[in-house]
Image (spheres, rainbow, N blue to C red):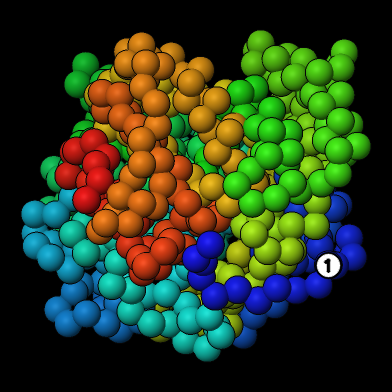
C-alpha cells in the first residue's frame, strides 16, 4: 500500500515507549495513554528563557510579517498574544489567505491533548509550511489551508504551547469561555476587526472532539445572549465545524478500541488474550461501560476521573500493543511527522514569543484529568451544533488507533440529530480526489463524515496513492468551507 516515507524502528521497552509516546497529542502518565495520576514530567528546557510578560486584560500584542513559515509573496502574517485577563495570555499565529484575503472566511485551528500546542497542526499538518522529515528546516506547503481561508492557530488553554499565565482551566466549558473572550478581544483589535463579519469556522483534532463541539455550542449560546440583550459583544458568524480524529462521546467510542485492535485494514494489534481481557474490563460489573454511564448520569469529578483512569489503564493503553498508536502501520515510535522542537525554538524570538514552548503542558492536562472532562459527553453539544445549521464534518484516518474509525462511526450512528434518519439510511461511498479513491464518506443534510485511507491521527500529514501529502485533506477542507457537502472529483 502506498504511504509516506517511513523508518521502521525495533520494538521498544515499556520505558522507551512512554518516552516516545509523550510527543503525541494524548499525554502519557505513568505509562498509560490518558492516565490520571499526576505526572512528574518537568517542562522541556529551551534556549528561550521565560521572560517577564506585561499582560493587560483586553490587550493584543502583535509581531507582523516575521517572514517565518509563510513565504508566499504579499501574504500578511501576525503572531502574538491576546490577554484574556491580567494573568492569562493566549498565543496565536495568523496567516491571511493566499487568495482574496479581504473576502475569505476565517478558520480557527485547535490541537488537542488536553494540553497540546496548536503549533502541531501548523508545522506538521496543514499550515503554510511543514517541517522537513529531517527536522532541519521548514518548506512551503502547497496544500496549506490558508490558500483560500484566513487561518488562525491558537494555543489554548492558557499554559499550552507559547501561551502563559495562570493555568486554572480544567474543563472544556472553561476553555470555551476563554476562547470566546479571546475572539472578542481579537476582533475588536483594529488589525483584525474586518474579520468580524466573515464566515467563521472551527477546525480541531484529537481532544478537539471535546473542544470543537463545546466551543461551537458556547459561541451559539453567546450569540443568542447578545441577540436578547443579556450579553454585550460581537456575534460570531459560525458556519462550519470540523473535527478530526476526535474524542467526543466515550460511551460509543470505547468499544471501538476493542474492535480496531482485533480487526483493522492493516493487522491485529495485540494477542487474543489481551483483547479478551479488554472485553471483560468493558462489560464487567463496575467496569468501563458502567463507569462511563455513571459519569454521564451527572457524575462528579471523582466519578468521571475514575472512569478515565480505569478505562485507559484496562482498554485504551493495553490494546495498542507495540504499534504506534497514532499510525499503526509502523512499530512504536513512528518518527513521522518529524519533530519541530529545535526549529520552533530557533524562531521563537523572531515571532514574538514570550515563553518557552512545550509540546504538551502536563499541568493543564492534570487539571482536566482531575475533573474527568475526558469522559463527559460532548456528543450533546455536537448534535446541538448540527441541529443549529452549522455545516459539520467529522473525519479520521483509518491507520489511527488512538481515536479510531470504528469508535467515531459508532458515535455518529448514535448522534441524535434532525438528519439521523437520512444518516442511517445511507452506506459509505468511495471518496475520490483527483481521480484517486482515497477514502469513504457520506453526507446527511449539513453533516458529513470521511474516513481517509492510509492516514494516521494527523490526517493532513499523510498521502495515498499518487496524491501529494495533504492533497486529500485540502479537498475536504475546501469543500466544507465552501458550504458544500463532500463530493468526489
Q: Quadrant of residue 103?
A: bottom left
The front one of 236 and 15 is 15
Residue at 21% across, 16% down: 228
Dot 1 alpha-carbon crowd within 10 angstroms: few under 14, some 14 to 19, many 20 or more:
few
Residue at 33% across, 62% down: 471
In the drawing, does residue 353 fall left or right of residue 59? Answer: right
- Residue 424 percent across, percent down from the top left: 41, 16
Residue at 39% across, 26% down: 427
In the drawing, does residue 334 fall left or right of residue 164? Answer: right
- Residue 481 percent across, percent down from the top left: 22, 45
Say if 118 sits above or below 288 in the image: below
Say if 448 sits above or below 154 in the image: above
- Residue 169 percent across, percent down from the top left: 58, 41
Q: Secondary structure at mark 1?
A: loop
The number of discs equals 1
Say if 322 sits above or below 340 in the image: above
Q: Disc 1 designates what residue?
A: 11
Q: Is residue 63 visible?
A: no
The front one of 78 and 334 is 334
Q: Is residue 323 visible?
A: yes
Amino acid at each position: 500500500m502506498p504511504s509516506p516515507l517511513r523508518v521502521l524502528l525495533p520494538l521498544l521497552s515499556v520505558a522507551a515507549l512512554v518516552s516516545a509516546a509523550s510527543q503525541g497529542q494524548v499525554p502519557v502518565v505513568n505509562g498509560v495513554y490518558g492516565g490520571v495520576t499526576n505526572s512528574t514530567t518537568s517542562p522541556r528546557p529551551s534556549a528561550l528563557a521565560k521572560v517577564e510578560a506585561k499582560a493587560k486584560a483586553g490587550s493584543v500584542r502583535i509581531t507582523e510579517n516575521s517572514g517565518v513559515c509563510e513565504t508566499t509573496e504579499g501574504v500578511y502574517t501576525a503572531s502574538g498574544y491576546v490577554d484574556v485577563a491580567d494573568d492569562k495570555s493566549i498565543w496565536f499565529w495568523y496567516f491571511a489567505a493566499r487568495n482574496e484575503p479581504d473576502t475569505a472566511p476565517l478558520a480557527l485551528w485547535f490541537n488537542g491533548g488536553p494540553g497540546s500546542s496548536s503549533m502541531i497542526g501548523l508545522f506538521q499538518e496543514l499550515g503554510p509550511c511543514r517541517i522537513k522529515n529531517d527536522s532541519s528546516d521548514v518548506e512551503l506547503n502547497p496544500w496549506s489551508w490558508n490558500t483560500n481561508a484566513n487561518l488562525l492557530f491558537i494555543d489554548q488553554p492558557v499554559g499550552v504551547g507559547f501561551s502563559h499565565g495562570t493555568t486554572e482551566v480544567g474543563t472544556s466549558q472553561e476553555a470555551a469561555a476563554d476562547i470566546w473572550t479571546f475572539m472578542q478581544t481579537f476582533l475588536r483589535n483594529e488589525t483584525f476587526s474586518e474579520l468580524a463579519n466573515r464566515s467563521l469556522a472551527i477546525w480541531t483534532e484529537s481532544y478537539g472532539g471535546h473542544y470543537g463541539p463545546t466551543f461551537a455550542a458556547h459561541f451559539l449560546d453567546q450569540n443568542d445572549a447578545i441577540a436578547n440583550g443579556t450579553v454585550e459583544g460581537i456575534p460570531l458568524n459560525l458556519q462550519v465545524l470540523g473535527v478530526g480524529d476526535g474524542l467526543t462521546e466515550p460511551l460509543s467510542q470505547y468499544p471501538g478500541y476493542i474492535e480496531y485492535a482485533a480487526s483493522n485494514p492493516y493487522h491485529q494489534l495485540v494477542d487474543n488474550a489481551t483483547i479478551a481481557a479488554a472485553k471483560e474490563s468493558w462489560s464487567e460489573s463496575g467496569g468501563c461501560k458502567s463507569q462511563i454511564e455513571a459519569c454521564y448520569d451527572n457524575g462528579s469529578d471523582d466519578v468521571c476521573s475514575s472512569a478515565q483512569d480505569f478505562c485507559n489503564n484496562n482498554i485504551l493503553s493495553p490494546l495498542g500493543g507495540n504499534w504506534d498508536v497514532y499510525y499503526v502501520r509502523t512499530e512504536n515510535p513512528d518518527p513521522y511527522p518529524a519533530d519541530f522542537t529545535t526549529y520552533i525554538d530557533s524562531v521563537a524570538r523572531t515571532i514574538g514569543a514570550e515563553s518557552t514552548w512545550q509540546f504538551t503542558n502536563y499541568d493543564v492536562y492534570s487539571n482536566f484529568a482531575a475533573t474527568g472532562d475526558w469522559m463527559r459527553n460532548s456528543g450533546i453539544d455536537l448534535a446541538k451544533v448540527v441541529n443549529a445549521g452549522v455545516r459539520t464534518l467529522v473525519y479520521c484516518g483509518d491507520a489511527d488507533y488512538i481515536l479510531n474509525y470504528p469508535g467515531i462511526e459508532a458515535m455518529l450512528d448514535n448522534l441524535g440529530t434532525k438528519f439521523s434518519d437520512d444518516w442511517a439510511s445511507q452506506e459509505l461511498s468511495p471518496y475520490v480526489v483527483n481521480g484517486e479513491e482515497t477514502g469513504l464518506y457520506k453526507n446527511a443534510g449539513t453533516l458529513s463524515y470521511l474516513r481517509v485511507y492510509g492516514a494516521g491521527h494527523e490526517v493532513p500529514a499523510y498521502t495515498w496513492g499518487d496524491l501529494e501529502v495533504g492533497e486529500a485533506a485540502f479537498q475536504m477542507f475546501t469543500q466544507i468551507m465552501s458550504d458544500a457537502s463532500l463530493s468526489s472529483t
